[in-house]
Image (cartoon, grey):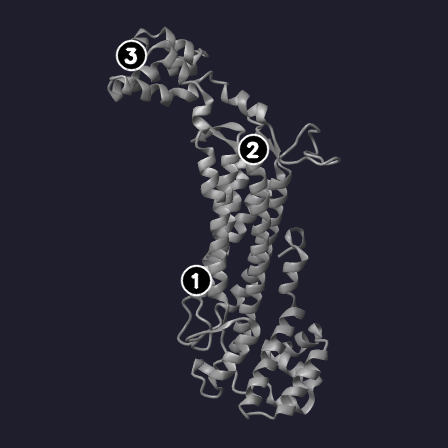
């Protein structure tokens, strides 16, 4: 993670200080449970909490110890013992390093999930507000980048709202799946520590016990979590690309807010570029790229190995920090998005009525013509609009085969824009309730 694309609250979750504090809490809660079971003295558990809670863990000192021990958890426990004193011998009783590392990772990912869920809520609120604002703002729908039929800009935003609502649901499930605790000792058999300790620690940290941890929490959970982040990132990119296309000079139906004093180009003073949504496209690529190594982490050797460790030290912070930043940025884009209804109508009318071709074709079939003949007649007149700049309605009215099947009034009625927006309220009810 780099500061340019980071926000402080999410970064704090992944700081060494936070990690060591969570490690301490895991060890201290385990000591409480061990004391209840009579494995260690109650006074020792109390001392560990009191002295450990007051301790200011020195990251550099722990790193210095690790340079000798080549083991991060042992380095931390050695440093912690300096604060706790003789009762430190009761810390980590029957536990293995993965108990601390995996449970801590679960805590960090659940905390990160809570921030991401709040981010999505903010984006949903912005999308809903702008969707209702432009519920009836008619614009052209496009397929293959080509004019298709009219829709409204509100419907476009309602689609994005529905998509991010699904993203939210997926993240809720991913959070639940990742929120497991493992305090089961070497190879996960509880040989040297009672399952009650795991249950106690899990309850205190808002987690649930991992049914079978083997010594590590199974990485299929993590694979699903990071895959979910990748899907959310893809939805961020989808909406960003829509905005980028709409901001093109030849289109200019919507535009990122351009603030006073902002510069678009070092060479061309006239430029107003979609830099925020272009940035979001790049950030989405990075978040998605972290899903694959998470999936490759699933296949560990036997009861454990640490091939996953180096991967997760990178993708844990990077994926969550980057997606947090991206969601926040996208919310800002939507909140301040400049929308140009006049340009939408101008663009829609550029090809002089072509967008009504389907209605005319369907009317011809209902008048008794075959679908093939109806398509041929409509396309024949449509091509004159494409190639000669003709007016579609005038061409149809001048076509004797068309007028032989349809009265002029019926043809003209097929050019009513309101026909295409008559079910917008139904769509909005489906999306927003």
Residue name at image x 59 percent, y 85 percent: 32
Q: State the residue at coordinates (53%, 90%).
A: 37
Q: Kindly state the secondary structure of the residue where label 3 is placed.
A: helix
How far across and how far down the image is residue 157, in percent? Answer: 52, 38
Q: Residues within 10 Å of mark 1 (few under 14, many from 20)?
A: some
Q: Residue 159 in the image: x percent, y percent?
A: 48, 40
> Residue 388's x, y, as percent?
44, 11
**1 and 3 marks in contact (CB < 8 Å):** no
Residue 76 vs 150, above or below: the answer is: below
Earlier in the chain: of badge 2 and badge 3, it is 2
Residue at the spot x=67%, y=76% of the render? 62
User: On residue 296, which mark appears?
Assistant: 1
Task: Note whether residue 320 is visible.
Answer: yes
Q: Secondary structure at mark 2?
A: loop
Residue placed under numbered mark 2 in the picture: 134
Q: Nearer the viewer, residue 242 or 156?
A: 156
Crowdedness near tag 2: few (<14), some (14–19) or many (≥20) residues, C-alpha within 10 Å? some
Residue 3 position (above or below residue 297): above
Please tell me which of labels 1 and 3 falls first in the chain: 1
Where is mark 3, residue-wise? 405
């Amino acid at each position: 993670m780099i500061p340019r694309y980071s926000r402080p609250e999410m970064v704090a979750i992944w700081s060494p200080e936070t990690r060591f504090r969570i490690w301490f809490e895991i060890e201290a809660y385990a000591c409480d449970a061990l004391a209840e079971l009579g494995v260690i003295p109650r006074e020792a558990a109390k001392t560990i909490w009191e002295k450990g809670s007051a301790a200011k863990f020195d990251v550099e000192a722990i790193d210095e110890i690790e340079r000798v021990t080549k083991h991060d958890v042992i380095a931390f426990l050695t440093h912690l013992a300096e604060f706790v004193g003789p009762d430190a011998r009761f810390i980590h009783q029957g536990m293995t390093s993965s108990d601390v590392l995996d449970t801590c990772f679960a805590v960090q990912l659940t905390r990160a999930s809570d921030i991401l869920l709040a981010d999505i809520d903010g984006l949903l609120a912005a999308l809903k507000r702008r969707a209702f604002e432009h519920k009836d703002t008619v614009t052209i729908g496009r397929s293959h980048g080509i004019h298709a039929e009219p829709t409204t800009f509100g419907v476009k935003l309602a689609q994005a709202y529905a998509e991010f609502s699904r993203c939210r649901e997926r993240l809720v499930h991913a959070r639940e799946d990742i929120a497991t605790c493992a305090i089961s000792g070497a190879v996960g058999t509880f040989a040297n520590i009672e399952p009650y300790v795991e249950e106690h620690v899990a309850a205190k940290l808002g987690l649930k016990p991992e049914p079978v941890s083997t010594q590590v929490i199974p990485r299929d959970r993590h694979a699903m979590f990071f895959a979910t982040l990748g899907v959310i990132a893809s939805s961020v990119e989808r909406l960003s690309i829509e905005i980028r296309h709409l901001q093109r000079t030849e289109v200019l139906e919507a535009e990122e807010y351009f603030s006073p004093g902002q510069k678009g180009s070092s060479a061309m003073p006239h430029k107003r570029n979609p830099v925020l949504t272009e940035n979001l496209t790049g950030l989405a690529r990075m978040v998605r790229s972290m899903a694959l190594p998470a999936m490759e982490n699933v296949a560990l050797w036997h009861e454990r190995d640490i091939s996953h460790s180096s991967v997760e030290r990178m993708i844990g912070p990077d994926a969550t920090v980057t997606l947090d930043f991206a969601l926040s940025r996208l919310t800002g884009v939507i909140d301040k998005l400049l929308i140009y209804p006049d340009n939408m109508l101008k663009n829609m009318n550029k090809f002089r009525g072509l967008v009504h071709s389907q209605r005319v074709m369907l009317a011809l079939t209902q008048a008794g013509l075959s679908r093939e003949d109806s398509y041929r007649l409509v396309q024949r007149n449509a091509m004159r609009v494409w190639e000669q700049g003709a007016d579609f309605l005038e061409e149809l009215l001048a076509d004797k085969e068309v007028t032989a099947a349809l009265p002029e009034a019926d043809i003209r009625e097929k050019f009513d824009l309101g026909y295409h927006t008559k079910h917008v309220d139904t769509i909005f009810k489906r999306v927003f309730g």
